[in-house]
Image: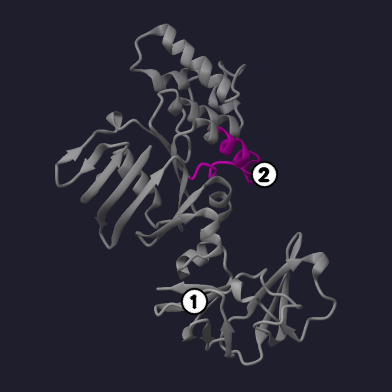
Amino acid sequence: MSLIVDIHRSLGAFSLDAAFEAENGVTCLLGASGCGKSFTLKCIAGIEKPDSGHIELDGVVLYDSGKHINLPPQKRQVGYLFQNYALFPNMTVRQNILCGLHREKDRAEKERRLAEMLKLMQLEGLENHKPAQLSGGQQQRVALARIMVNEPRMLMLDEPFSALDAHLRDSLKIELRDMLQRYGREVLMVTHSREEAYNMSSRIAVMDKGKLLGMKDTKELFADPGSVPAAVLTGCKNIAAARKTGDHEVEVPEWGIRLQTAREVGDGLAAVGIRAHYFNTQTQQNRFPVQYVEEMEEPFEVILQFRYAGQQPESAPVWWRLSKEKRPREFPAELGIAPANILLLYS
């Protein structure tokens, strides 16, 4: 199965340009709130209409501005899970799920598919409960069952964990991930959480201010985000403007240092990034004098802030994150970082 999206839409001062392809598995659109992620889903589902472009699912054209094709939502065979699940509060679990089969006339077939969904979603015994009687996770499974009972060609999830309490999210991420693997079709998920994107998806497309910056395999993106917005979204805390000074060397004026890199430096370099947990007291490469500034304590980790000896005084301190049991008794005079851990970020 495959999805092809190449659309443009102007919304006042905001402009959306999204172009990507996705295949079987879970693809995540990762970006800050207001960057156009949810609007992209709505265009695919047919709830919103782009100004121009093309949307195709499994060889079927859903939208094409040049050919004047714009299939209505009910003909696109796309399942859309809204952030708040949109369950009917006065209907039971059974009634909510059967709403997804309102076009099916065969009563026996309806009952068969209902039973199948109740078993798949582990909702057996809750058929006569109403949404208010269910936990957040159970409500999510009912909403998914209502979508999937109609056997859509693709499933789209819009911030699927935003309506859940924080303590439920970790267990439900595992539960939903396993269920989506059993689903076995294309899934497109929207989130602003890098943890959700990393845990749930095999590919991530980064969006920033209405632009899709590119798509990579999940682990590859975190290892090499490639741009400043992608580095920020994947949790990089130390980012500074840099310029190329050699094939494997960059200068970082803000920090007053030059760094050796494992990756070859391209001509369009804009900045470098160093993840806070990459610093090491033993590493001899890219080793420079540092001065302690302050620290922040977290439940299981500590963030030690420091400045390089030649760092510009107006610049922000650099973050070093490590587990509490590894915190040194005395702050080291020097810190190093392996060339492979220097992120090269381009404009």
Relative horizontal placement of residue 167, taking residue 190 as reference (left or right): right
Q: Position of residue 68 (x, y in %)?
A: 14, 41
Q: Pointer 1: residues within 10 angstroms few (<14), some, or many (20+)?
A: few
Residue 63 visible in this rendered orientation of the protein: yes
Q: Quadrant location of residue 304?
A: bottom right
- Quarter of the rendering containing residue 172: top right
Where residue 132 sits: x, y (%)?
Answer: 56, 28
Front-most of 289 and 185? 185
Label 1 sits on a secondary structure element that is loop
Magenta-drawn stretch, dominant element (helix, strand or loop): helix
- Within the magenta stretch, is there residue 5? no
Name the residue tied to disc 2. 167
64 or 311: nearer the viewer? 64
**Over which residues does the magenta segment extend?**
159-179
Q: Is residue 193 visible?
A: no
Q: Secondary structure at mark 2?
A: helix
Image position of 65 with respect to 185: above or below = below
Residue 95 percent location from the top left of the image: 47, 17
Q: Amino acid at mark 2?
A: His
Q: Label for residue 254?
A: none
Q: Mark 1 sits on what residue? A: 264
> On screen, 48 above or below 103?
below
Decide if residue 34 is on the left or right side of residue 337.
left
Is residue 298 positioned above or below 198 on the image? below
Locate residue 148: give its quadrant.
Answer: top left
Q: CA distance from mark 2 to mark 1?
A: 43 Å
Badge 2: few (under 14), some or many (20 or more) residues near its Cα, within 10 Å? few
Q: Is 166 one of the magenta-colored residues?
A: yes
Question: Residue at 56% across / 49% down in the picture?
Answer: 196
